[in-house]
């Protein structure tokens, strides 16, 4: 389905072609194997680094692409358009690496970013804990200063890239009595003594995503691993979350278009009661609604992408984008599963796979209820 767009330049579209070829050549054929073993192989990470598909927004002097949000956007779109699931490139490149770009010292950036951009050092971010969910202020993982080191104790859950990660940007309480003002961000290398990975979590969908629990038992890291200032971690996370939420909206906009195309192909070929499923008026009306939703979501998301490229995206606008895109996608995906009949429940069909993979979008990055609260504050 083609919708006229105007936010991308020629250099964005050139990268889009590279990304499209990469996902079709390197990822689609490996999806079944990744699903089986529960993680993406590291060689594919290295290939993505060699092709310039990691860290497109990191400055060139640190090994990145030196691009803007438009370059990152086309990679996210092409990953979703290919139906690739569980690949943690955008989280690594455009969410976590940006903390280091924005907050890191010159020494931290020069030490860490080149390997991150090459795909040699895979990043995870440790925010969510078993008892706190979207309430980041309630984190209980502690980092206690001991001379020139922090001693870290606690656990995190639902951590994407958890099996593969070589470094975790960890939200810790450096001052447990200070609430949100006591949270700091500390980079923890995965080879530190006392760090261990828990089980790979058995999720409803995205089996290739290596989502795990992480445990920290008297893990010692140098104070030089602190990102930014002590006590500013909550503020830093709140500043980065709008971009993460916009990424989720971008993915849902692309998936809605893709799934409508898949469903149209199916209903125009599948026969029932002497005619195709498409011949029923109910089908036409359901998919007409889906087409209208595609245009509405795409128009909204592109507008907000343009705003973010101008550094004007607000917390409220990111919440609107994520809430509307994820809830709209889910409503129409449910209808499209129904139009597939029994085959819509078979995981060999893309529509069923999408049904399991995409349900998490209404939870990850802050649940829909959190987005509603953020929007309501401005009413």
Image (spheres, rainbow, N blue to C red):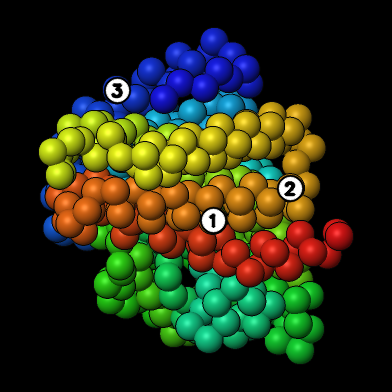
x and y, in percent, of residue 303 in the image:
68, 32
Q: Earlier in the sequence, mark 3 or mark 1?
A: 3
* Kind of element beneath mark 3: helix
Dot 1 corresponds to which residue?
Answer: 327
Q: Quadrant of the C terminus?
A: bottom right
Label 2 close to label 3 by CB (< 8 Å): no
Tell me if 13 is positioned left or right of 333 in this view.
Answer: right
251 or 41: nearer the viewer: 251
41 or 338: nearer the viewer: 338
Dot 3 corresponds to which residue?
Answer: 21
367 or 56: nearer the viewer: 367
x and y, in percent, of residue 181 in the image:
79, 75
**In this view, the mark in front (2 or 3):** 2
Dot 2 corresponds to which residue?
Answer: 317
Q: Taking the image as drawn, is residue 252 in sight?
A: yes
Tell me if 216 is positioned left or right of 357 in this view.
Answer: right
C-alpha span from label 3 to label 1: 30 Å
149 or 2: nearer the viewer: 2
Q: Earlier in the sequence, mark 1 or mark 2?
A: 2
Residue drawn at 36 percent across, 39 percent down: 281
**In this view, the mark in front (3 or 1):** 1
Q: Give above or below for 289 relative to 146.
A: above
Q: Give above or below for 27 relative to 363.
A: above
Instruction: Say which quarter of the image contains residue 78.
Output: top left
Residue drawn at 28 percent across, 76 percent down: 199
Q: Quadrant of the N terminus?
A: top left
Tell me if 259 is positioned left or right of 364 in this view.
Answer: left
For label 3, the crowd category at 10 Å Cα-Cα, with few meaning under 14, some 14 to 19 and many 20 or more, is some
C-alpha span from label 2 to label 3: 32 Å
């Amino acid at each position: 389905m083609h919708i006229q767009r105007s936010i991308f330049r020629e250099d964005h579209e050139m990268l889009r072609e590279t990304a499209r070829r990469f996902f079709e050549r390197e990822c689609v054929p490996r999806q079944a194997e990744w699903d089986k073993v529960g993680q993406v192989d590291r060689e594919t990470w290295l290939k993505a680094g060699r092709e310039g598909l990691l860290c497109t927004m990191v400055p060139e002097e640190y090994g990145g692409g030196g691009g803007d949000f438009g370059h990152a956007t086309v990679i996210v779109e092409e990953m979703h358009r290919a139906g690739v699931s569980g690949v943690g490139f955008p989280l690594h490149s455009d969410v976590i690496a940006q903390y280091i770009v924005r907050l890191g010292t010159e020494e931290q950036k020069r030490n860490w970013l080149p390997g991150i951009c090459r795909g040699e050092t895979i990043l995870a971010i440790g925010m969510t804990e078993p008892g706190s969910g979207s309430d980041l202020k309630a984190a209980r993982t502690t980092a206690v200063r001991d001379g020139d080191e922090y001693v870290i104790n606690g656990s995190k859950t639902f951590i994407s890239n958890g099996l593969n990660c070589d470094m975790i940007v960890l939200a810790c309480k450096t001052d447990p009595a200070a609430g949100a003002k006591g949270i700091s961000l500390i980079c923890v290398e995965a080879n530190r003594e006392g760090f261990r990975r828990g089980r790979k979590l058995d999720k409803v969908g995205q089996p290739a995503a290596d989502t795990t629990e992480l445990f920290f038992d008297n893990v010692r890291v140098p104070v030089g691993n602190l990102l930014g200032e002590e006590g500013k971690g909550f503020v830093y996370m709140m500043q980065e979350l709008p971009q993460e939420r916009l990424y989720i909206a971008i993915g849902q906009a692309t998936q809605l278009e893709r799934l409508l195309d898949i469903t149209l192909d199916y209903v125009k070929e599948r026969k029932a009661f002497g005619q195709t499923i498409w011949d029923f008026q109910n089908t036409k009306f359901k998919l007409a609604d889906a087409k209208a939703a595609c245009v509405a979501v795409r128009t909204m998301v592109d507008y907000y992408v343009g705003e973010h490229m101008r550094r004007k995206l607000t917390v409220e606008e990111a919440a609107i984008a994520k809430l509307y895109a994820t809830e709209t996608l889910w409503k129409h995906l449910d209808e499209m599963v129904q139009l597939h009949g029994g085959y819509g429940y078979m995981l060999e069909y893309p529509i069923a796979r999408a049904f399991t993979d995409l349900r998490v979008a209404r939870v990850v990055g802050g649940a829909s209820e959190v987005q509603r609260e953020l929007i309501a504050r401005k009413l």
